Image (cartoon, rainbow, N blue to C red):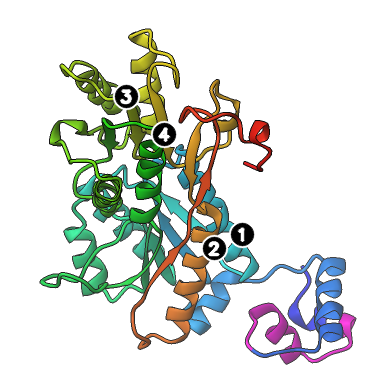
């Protein structure tokens, strides 16, 4: 098996230079770095991660705890985390907390026991156990997608956090529907207790206010962030004496449940009821009609979370911060508008 000394001889550099290239501990001239990497490839050298971790007290690994990994949105985040971690020379350990506070604390403890250098966690609706564990064990961590305020504070983060904008994009969906003449616009919101849910409700209500529409509590229902709950919530909306003429869904999983309920009632989108959704997903453009949506920058969120965590590892005492990334309004036809291509504008 090739050793670091073998790589150094092959590349014509010192062992220390090989170490700096492989560990990223000091800048190295591009041509020297390439010579080392070529030697590594030629000799088939692999780093002894265990031995290095014993010396440095670092494993160069990151723990990722994200629920609903099958959700396309979280899959995009995972891809962003993985790519950024790999680029920085870190491996990734993944666990699914299933949005359950008890299981969340268990998987975070297991990741910690694997001696990851830090964690990226999408917290559950009740993250008290999670925060207690991270705080007591002084685990470097970044909260992902869902925000958590410091205990006893109205504002201000407890840990570094990375997420998308929620309120303004939701408001834009509502005002867009209002601009098309809708006066009874309903929201199928996510699981109560999640910051994404509360912020999107705030955006929904501000959009109604901006459009001069009164808030009707009967038009706000919770689908618990999943398909089955959204189907049941939509059934409740359709049973109202004056049902909504337009729907906004709080995430892509709930959009599927809403469409299922509308289909069961023989309702056509957008002819019978308009639909907009928060969360775009790869096949949204293949639905008939094509879904008007808010697209979150999932990969960018994942990559930024890794960078924020690495900055925390390099500078443990830096002030905590919350990073919000902008969303994109994707205009298609489920809202009742003509196809953007027919209008002569890009989607």
Nearer the observer: mark 2 or 4; the answer is 4
User: Is 13 part of what is drawn in magenta?
Assistant: yes
Nearest the viewer among 48 and 325 is: 325
Percent coordinates x, y for residue 12 in the rendering: 89, 88
Residue placed most toward the observer, 212 or 186: 212
Magenta stretch: includes residue 259: no
- Classify residue 210 as left or right of residue 3: left
Where are the magenta residues, as a range?
Answer: 9-25
Residue annotated with mark 4: 180
Which of marks 1 and 2 precedes in the sequence?
1
Tell me which corner region of the image, top left, top right, bottom left or bottom right, holds residue 279.
top left
Frontmost of labels 2 and 1 is 2
Return the residue at label 1.
83
Q: CA distance from mark 2 to mark 4?
A: 37 Å
Q: Residue at x 32, y 56 (%)?
A: 146
For residue 245, the mark is 3
Task: Indicate which disc residue 139 carries.
Answer: none
Percent position of residue 256, x then y: 41, 26
Between discs 4 and 3, the one toward the N terminus: 4
Work out whether 237 lies above or below 94.
Answer: above
Structural distance between the alpha carbons of marks 2 and 1 = 7 Å
| Nearest to the observer: residue 7 or residue 26 | 26
Q: Are marks 2 and 1 in contact (CB under 8 Å)?
A: yes
Viewer-side label of 1, 4: 4
Quick check: 101 left or right of 48? left
């Amino acid at each position: 098996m090739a050793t670091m000394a073998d790589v150094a001889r092959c590349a014509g550099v010192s062992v220390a230079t090989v170490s700096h290239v492989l560990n990223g501990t000091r800048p190295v001239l591009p041509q020297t770095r390439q010579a080392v990497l070529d030697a590594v490839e030629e000799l088939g050298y692999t780093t002894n991660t265990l031995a290095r971790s014993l010396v440095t007290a670092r494993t160069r690994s990151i723990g990722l705890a994200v629920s609903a990994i099958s959700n396309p949105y979280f899959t995009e985040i995972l891809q962003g985390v993985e790519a950024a971690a790999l680029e920085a020379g870190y491996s990734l350990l993944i666990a699914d907390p299933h949005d359950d506070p008890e299981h969340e604390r268990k998987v975070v403890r297991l990741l910690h026991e694997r001696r990851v250098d830090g964690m990226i966690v999408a917290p559950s609706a009740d993250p008290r156990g999670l925060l207690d564990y991270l705080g007591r064990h002084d685990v470097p961590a970044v909260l992902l997608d869902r925000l958590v305020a410091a205990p006893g504070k109205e504002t201000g983060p407890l840990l570094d956090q990375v997420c998308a904008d929620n309120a303004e994009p939701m408001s834009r969906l509502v005002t867009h529907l209002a601009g098309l003449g809708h006066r009874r616009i309903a929201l199928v919101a996510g699981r109560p207790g999640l910051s994404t849910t509360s912020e999107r409700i705030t955006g929904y209500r501000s959009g109604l206010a901006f459009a001069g529409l009164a808030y009707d509590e009967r038009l706000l229902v919770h689908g618990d962030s999943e398909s089955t709950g959204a189907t049941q919530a939509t059934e409740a909306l359709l049973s109202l004496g004056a049902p909504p003429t337009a729907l906004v869904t709080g995430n892509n999983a709930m959009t599927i449940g809403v469409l299922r309920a509308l289909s069961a009632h023989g309702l056509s989108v957008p002819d019978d009821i308009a639909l907009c959704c928060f969360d775009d997903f790869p096949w949204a453009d293949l639905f008939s009609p094509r879904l008007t949506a808010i697209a979150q920058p999932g990969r960018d969120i994942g990559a930024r979370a890794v960078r924020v965590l690495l900055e925390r590892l390099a500078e443990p005492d830096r002030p905590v911060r919350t990073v919000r990334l902008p969303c994109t309004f994707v205009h298609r036809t489920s809202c009742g508008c003509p196809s953007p291509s027919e209008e002569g504008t890009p989607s």
